[in-house]
Image: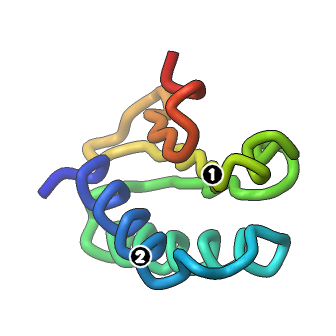
Amino acid sequence: MNVKEAVQKEYFDILNDFSLEVIDQVLRYKFTEYLNLLMNYLHFKRQICEFRVVCDETNNLPEDVEDGYINVYVFYKELPYDFEYKKVILGNPRLLK
């Protein structure tokens, strides 16, 4: 499984676990922490060298929250050393356009 697939799987697993919760700062923090654990594991396994997970008010607009979306951006560099970050965007399909 590549990095993007692993991130997508983890996102949907977390989403299923917390599907009935209110989308707020606490839930966004949980998403960030779970994805940070995954990315640290991938770093330990030497699949990536750097990463950053963003799931906060900067990428979760009020209209997304009202529509039930929780948006997550994951930036990472794969090994052997990439010079540019790759990005996985999860959440509102509007973001994928």
Residue 58 position, x and y percent, is 85, 44
The residue lying toward the viewer, choosing from 40 and 69, is 69
State the image quarter where residue 42 is shown: bottom left
Question: Which residue is at a point 54% across and 46% down the rendered structure image?
Answer: 91
Residue count near mark 1 (Cα–Cα under 10 Å), binned few <14, some 14–19, many ≥20? some
Badge 1 element: loop
By what rule are the colours in the image chosen? rainbow
State the image quarter where residue 44 is shown: bottom left
Question: Which residue is at a point 48% across and 27% down the rendered structure image?
Answer: 84
Residue count near mark 2 (Cα–Cα under 10 Å), binned few <14, some 14–19, many ≥20? few
State the image quarter where residue 77 is shown: top left
Amino acid tagged 2: Asn
Q: How far apart are marks 1 and 2 (CA)?
A: 13 Å
Residue that carries the numbered disc 2 in the rendered image: 16
The residue lying toward the viewer, choosing from 56 and 49, is 56
Residue 62 position, x and y percent, is 87, 46
Residue 38 position, x and y percent, is 41, 74
Amino acid tagged 1: Tyr
Residue that carries the numbered disc 1 in the rendered image: 69
Q: Quadrant of the N terminus?
A: bottom left
Question: Which residue is at a point 82% across and 70% down the rendered structure image?
Answer: 24
The residue lying toward the viewer, choosing from 17 and 43, is 17
In the displayed structure, 35 sits above or below 70; it is below
Q: Which residue lies furthest to the left in this view?
A: 1
Question: Which residue is at a point 35% across and 40% down the rendered structure image?
Answer: 81
Mark 1 or mark 2, which has the lower sequence index? 2
